Amino acid sequence: MAMAFDSALWIAKMTWIALSGWITSCLTVADEFATSLRSGDIGPFHVG
């Protein structure tokens, strides 16, 4: 069963939007975390 080309492009576009939003969120959290570590607001984590 063949998929229309427009449908394939729509699916690719929606997938890209979802992934780019997720990546942006992760990078924002990582940047805030790194800034807090550098400024001394939070210290190193001791596990165990």
Image: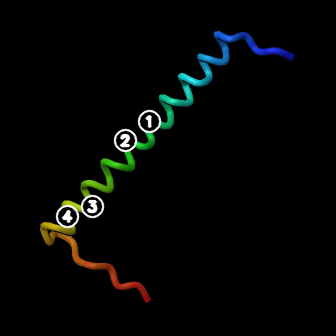
Res 1 → quadrant: top right
Label 3 belongs to which residue?
Answer: 33
Q: Which residue is mark 1?
A: 20
Q: CA distance from mark 3 to mark 1?
A: 20 Å
**CA separation, marks 4 and 1?**
24 Å
Q: Amino acid at mark 2?
A: Thr
Label 2 sits on a secondary structure element that is helix
Q: Which residue is denoted by mark 4 in the rendering?
A: 36
Q: Is residue 43 above or below residue 31?
A: below
Q: Amino acid at mark 3?
A: Phe
Q: Which residue is mark 2?
A: 24
**Alpha carbons under labels 2 and 4: distance apart:** 18 Å
The answer to whether 26 appears left or right of 5 in the picture is: left
Q: Residues within 10 Å of mark 1 (few under 14, many from 20)?
A: few
- Please state which of the two labelled residues, at mark 4 or mark 1, is closer to the viewer: 1
Q: Quadrant of the C terminus?
A: bottom left
